[in-house]
Amino acid sequence: VLHMFSEPLLIGRDDSDDVLEKRRISSDLRFALKTYSPVIYKSASPCTSSMLKSIVLGSNHMNHVICQLSDEWGEPAETFRKKATMILEEMADNLHLSAIRLLAFILSKVFKRVFRRIRVNTEGIERLKKALSDNPVVLLPNHRSYMDFLILSFVFYTYDLNIPVIAARGLLEIKILSTILRRSGAFYIRREIGTNKLYWAVLSEYVKTMLRMGYAPIEFYVEGARSRSFKSLLPKLGLLNIVTDAFLKKEVADVTLVPISITYERPVDETLHAHDLLGLPKIKESMWALFKARKILGQDFGTSSIHLGEPVSLKALVQGDVNLSQYNLDHRHIPHRPSQEIKAFLHHTGCRMIHLQEENMVISPFVLVQTLRLRYYVLSCGVCIDWPDHMSPEAVVVSSISLHRNIVKIDNGKTMLVQEQQADSSTDKHLMQYAVTVLTCSMYRNQILHIFVRPALAAMALSFTNKTQKEEIFICYSFLQDLFSSEFVFLPGNAKQDFEEACHRLSEWGAVQISKQNIELTETGPLVIFFILSIFQPFLEGYQVCYRIVDFFLYFSKSTICGPEQINMTETLIFPYFQIS
Amino acid sequence: VCSGHCWSVCLSVAGCYINKMYYLMPDDSTNCFVYIFTFLNRQDLLKWNGWGYSDSKFIFNKKGQAEFTGKRYRLSGMVLPALREWFEKTFGASLEHKTPPRSALNTSDIPAPILNEDFLDDLKATKIPFSHEIEDRIFRAHGHCLHEIFALREGKFERVPDMVVWPSKYPNNKSILSFGVKYFIFTLTGGTSVSSALECPPDEKRSIVSLDTSQMNRILWIDEKNLTAHVEAGIIGQDLERLLNVSGYCTGHEPDSMEFSTLGGWVATRASGMKKNIYGNIEDLVVHIRMVTPRGVIEKSCQGPRMSTGPDVHHFIMGSEGTLGVVTEVTIKIRPVPEYQKYGSVEVAKQRCAPASIRLMDNAQFQFGHALKPQVASIFTSFLDGLKKFYITKFKGFDPNQLCVATLLFEGDREKVLQHEKQVYDIAAKFGGLAAGEDNGQRGYMLTFVIAYLRDLGMDFYVIGESFETSVPWDRVLDLCRNVKERIVRECKERGVQFPPLSTCRVTQTYDAGACVYFYFAFNYRGIADPIHVYEQIESAAREEILANGGSLSHHHGVGKLRKRWLQEAISDVGIGMLKSVKQYVDPNNIFGNRNLL
């Protein structure tokens, strides 16, 4: 398999810059005290965070909601006003340059210890600089680690980009930390976001005001939460809705969305993720826990890469998808639930942003090794792989394995899981450790799923239907896409195109031959397809088990979960697969 | 016997084009005997390929300083030292790069007239004057859209009217129409339309007759009891005002085109006057309208000030843009001439207390206004000016690059004006505004009349531009202004305009529920192959932006042909259907076939 890598694979698409390189040769103190003069939005009005708060609380929107609530509950408006002030106090950022400098100093020290490199695409920096002056900017990074926003703000500081304000969840319990982060641009969102009217009003007015004033770029995670499995999550639309609403109501001329892909060779919190996935009791966020976590400082986490994507104009996305005239007749300050049309648009946009993030994720050699380790076949298809070109494939594999020595090791020329030997010992502790190791491995494998998901679904459809007519295969394909639509991110309404692309890919890999009406397996086809399918085996099995259990319970309650024909379809589709494997 | 200032110009369905021109009464007109001399050939007095009077225009003199020629306006004959620098700085234009217009029209460019002999015979029998001279025809083939003026200067017309007729009173009109039903199509001449309303449909195969109402220009009576005047619809705004002034009255309707636009044109386009806060827009001023249509005459049977007789039929007429018939006579409200007039200017105010006219200019226009400051003769005034500037910028801390100014006009009896003025200045002071004096106020209004002349100057040096308007609710005004200006700048960049454009706006009319916003947009087109096409693309992008920001399709320019494609969206399918069925009933053979609106 390794010979596949000996040809020059893609090593990042554009010139990348190592942020830490300069840090290692010059003083951190001077870095923290450097003149920092970022480009700002050209029609920004100068505004401090306390001014921002008073604008939010005095806005028509807030007044309206407060009056409405006081009518509803029969309490004086003043109580709600106080509540709103408290919510805003808890939520709002308190951006200060001094805090950023302090953080830059600390992070510089930390990052130099734990990372070998922090790579950033330079052309992305230039693009972003331009975008920042033209329009209010919303940054949309993917979310894989607690480190994400720290590392991003660090990079922004290094390149003299305007430090963003960041939507954060949790951490409020740790007073000191949350204060430091607040001063360096974090704002906090509680989970009541969707249910509490007043909370929603404060949040949306706060975000909109920042956009309008050009206060700072706004950063939030489209996926809403950290993805513990390293697989992209379906988009959460709350904040995207607020941003879009500000544009649709024309409070801003346009908004630039910048998808950002952050990938780690080894995330700082990898084991934490595995623990979360196993459902082990969550380690409470506290100063003490943070203190205990200091031991990570002694470890090596390899390279992390940041790719600042091509800026996307929200205006261009909206064009044609949304009927704007409805907004001309509404009262501008009364909040509305988004219409079906808007919801569909938001979902579509969210998915598209996630796709753009995925497109530019960097695949580290270890991910490939891991996929192999779990006995899977790997093919490359135009993704960024961070493959050192001056090293032999063997050396690369060995070095990346050594980076991950907590989970794998080389023994007599074989790679194996660290925990494997003790796997047969039946104590709970060992079992858990083994599970953590396996899950961690699978997390790495998951990083590559987005590349294979469409071809794999097409391959599944091909082998399930056992037919050659394109149309029949497509019907099966779109069923599968539906089935997995909450597992992987698909652009809604794009099934036909996805399918065509997937088939094309399969034929590129020599698995199938495509004619106008038919798709036929080639000689080597079954082998390729078998390997691609096996990457997705855990998902199929997982769904199968869930289906069985649900069906089992429903059998007793004498009802069915779905129409009989759909059940039949699932049965026929999934069973033959087990015969293959 | 002509006073030298009283020109009557033939226009009928004139898109009254506010803010393009501001009319200032010539100083000596009050003391001379006024006799309206009517020219059939207005091209002798007016530019054939630009705005306004032939003798009034901006030029760069031998010293390279800007100068406004002629004697008609306050600015006439004055040297404007700051204009050249402003012009070069704003547009990146240079006096060396010239684009002079052709000196005369190439007659071979004009399509030969399509004449109908039967019609000519009938017309000769009625003794109505008519002409199919090239000059007469080309003069009535266009309004003042950029592309029309550009075509005059260096382009070509695909279709122009085939003949011009000058009916002089209402029965005449009726008889022409009755011939028309048999043979022809009419389009009505206008002069100041900026919505392509006067463009002849290029695929029209019938003979196009341009009906010039300039001879229907008499005030038939003035009723001092009811304060109304009955006027023939072809009368020019400035003549109407002056004739009423002789009897001590005025209409108070002052669209900026009033030097050239007609009463009938105001009615047909739903015009708006600068002083509408006191006097009202045309729909508030009109008491009675008589219109001749192919079906017959439409008018109300009495002059009651308000009626509940179903939908008001006047509203079928106002804004019909010449698609239904010819407005022949109008009864209009009049008021005694105000005793006292005062200009003023301040910073922004927030309470509602409206002077006769209030206009809020953005910073770009404030600077533009200053570029038009005439040369000061005495050292003392220039010293005073410097002192003023020092006070505002240094002492008060106003940044000249951020300053914006509201110009005001107060009207009424002296006591009231002063009281009103104080009220307004008090409000302004509350919001950090500063009374900036009468001079600044007057200069603001001056801008509105010279701007159209300035466009001709720009066009001599690779600069093209245009203005457009909208109306919008208060809460959207600021966002709309910012977004539209920004959109214009961006579109220019994307379409390869090499120099940053002038993209500026001002609020020109205020209402209880919103305001009228007026945009000026101009750019230097050096290096662009097809500037008119680029211009049109940018303007339509700007219009899209206006609509998306909750602005209206038009506040007073009208729809014409320029904005037709958005009308359906603006008034809904049912709305279009209603208009169509009215047109279908009134004019089934499409005699008034100018194809505006629908």
Image: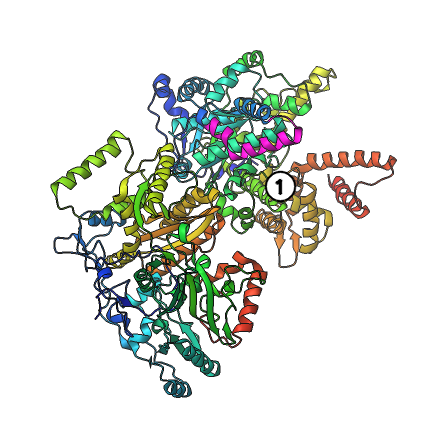
Q: Which residue is mark 1?
A: A453
Q: Nearer the viewer, residue B153 or A13?
A: B153
Residue B528: percent from left, percent from top = 31, 57
Q: Main secondary structure of the magenta part?
A: helix
Describe residue A575's horizontal placement relative to residue A260 as left or right.
right
Q: Tag 1: Cα neighbours inside 10 Å, few (<14), some, or many (≥20)? A: many
Q: Quadrant of residue B270?
A: bottom left
Describe residue B167's horizontal placement relative to residue A578 as left or right.
left
Furthest toward the front, the residue is B225
Residue A486: percent from left, percent from top = 66, 38
Describe residue B70's horizontal placement relative to residue A573 as left or right.
left
- Identify the subunit bearing mark 1: A
Residue A412 visible in the picture: no
Residue A471: percent from left, percent from top = 68, 55
**As drawn, B237 above or below A434:** below
Q: For numbered disc 1, what is the local secondary structure?
A: helix
* Residue drawn where x is 44% and y is 30% of the image: A119
Q: Amino acid at mark 1?
A: Val
**As drawn, B79 above or below B231:** above
Residue B9 visible in the picture: yes
Q: Nearer the viewer, residue B56 or B151?
A: B56
* Residue drawn where x is 30% and y is 79% of the image: B133
Q: Which residues are magenta?
A: A52-76
How many numbered tags mark residues here? 1
Residue A33: percent from left, percent from top = 35, 19
